[in-house]
Amino acid sequence: MSDLKGALIGCGFFAVNQMHGWKGVQGATIVAICDRDPERLKIVGDQFGIDRRYTDASQMFAEGGFDFVDIATTVNSHRPLIEMAALHKVPAICQKPFAPTLADAKAMVAACKTAGVPLMIHENFRWQTPIQAVRKALESGAIGLPFWGRFSFRSGYDVFSGQPYLAEGKRFIIEDLGIHTLDIARYILGDVTSLTARTKRVNPRINGEDVATILLDHDNGATSIVDVSYATKQSIEPFPETLIEIDGTEGSIRLSQGYELQVTNADGTVNTDVAPTLLPWASRPWHNIQESVFAIQQHWADSLKAGTETSTSGTDNLKTFALVEAAYESAATKTTVDIGTLLT
Ligand code: NAD
Ligand code: 89V
């Protein structure tokens, strides 16, 4: 089977990782790019040798000649661009966060369903090597049935220099980073029935919250905590590591700073180095994220060819996005929010 042809929209900060990722993916090639900013279009077009360049996405769709689109723009453009893809019956990948609101996200899923095209959200954190290792350890049965978990991302890393828009919005850490951590919690412990959240803004130079603590009730009866912070100064900066603790009926799993996995049960303790690979184009400390970009893109190419649903399909990611909406609602109202109600 010949390579799938892809088009990428949005040639900003993160798209450079996606373009590098696509170079390594087997079975897919980017043939066209689009950015409404001609300068970004030129930088990325020249760096990756792409001749077909557009400043207008509708013109690119009208000319066609690609099998899927990869949308790497910021959130406000996601719905119109996904609806454009659906109109042209083009399978689509959309960066997180899914949409500005859950209603928009539901409309995007509906548009793709009606058009009969797959939609995948680029929710890459569950594809990180250490996260995959935790899931495998749990699936092996080594710790029995999980009843408690903690998914923690606490950092003082300056994300605002690369992504200045993160300082501007009324919402920050839950929508941008917590969305990944909530998705990991779902991926490891299963879907969530209800949630309680508290937030804080510590950094006075940003508009949104930079600390959040979220208590999750999972379908399987497990309880977990998702705690995220960009206001935490530590001796060794852990960015961008998610640290995990899982307690089960027969043992425990710990994913510690430095990508160390420890699985303990009645047979003893097994320690494993689960550090991500440093891909040739990647750089520390981002390599953990960069490797997961390649992994999710390979998964997309394989799934599109096989006609199978992706792990983070639009339908799946509605359940993660609902947790984001619920966390803001819970923090604002100081109530526990029922997730089922949001998803109906
Ligand atoms: P950015 O602002 O650097 O880049 C976005 C680009 O999209 C800009 O060049 C802009 O001109 C272009 N653009 C916006 N609307 C457009 C439209 N309608 N048509 C054509 N071009 C358009 O932003 P970024 O930091 O690269 O973030 C992009 C997305 O990636 C965000 O949703 C962000 O949350 C996400 N992101 C994901 C990860 C991850 O690990 N999954 C990491 C960082 C950022
Ligand atoms: O993954 C992201 O969305 C990024 C970062 C890791 C910096 O929060 O914005």
Image (spheres, helix red, strand yellow):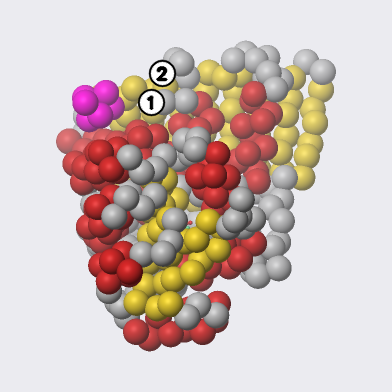
| Pointer 2 or 1: first along the chain | 1
- Can you give x and y, in whole percent of width and height, for residue 168 in the image? 26, 67
- Callout 1 amino acid: Val
- Tell whether 26 sits left or right of 120: right
Q: CA distance from mark 2 to mark 1?
A: 6 Å
Evaluate if marks 2 and 1 touch, with contact meaning CB atoms under 8 Å apart.
Answer: yes
Q: Which mark is residue 192?
A: 1
The residue positioned 47% from the left and 80% from the top of the image is 51
Which quarter of the figure has residue 105? top left
Nearer-the-camera pick, 66 or 97: 66
Tell me where the magenta segment starts and ends, as one range.
Answer: 339-344
Callout 1: helix, strand or loop? strand
User: Residue 213: in sight, yes or no?
Assistant: no
Q: Quadrant of the C terminus?
A: top left
Whether 239 is among the magenta residues is no
Residue 126 against residue 241 in the figure, above or below: above
- Can you give x and y, in whole percent of width and height, for residue 33 in the image? 42, 72
Name the residue that disc number 2 marks.
219
- Tell whether 47 sits left or right of 226: right
Q: Which mark is residue 5?
A: none
Nearer-the-camera pick, 191 or 262: 191
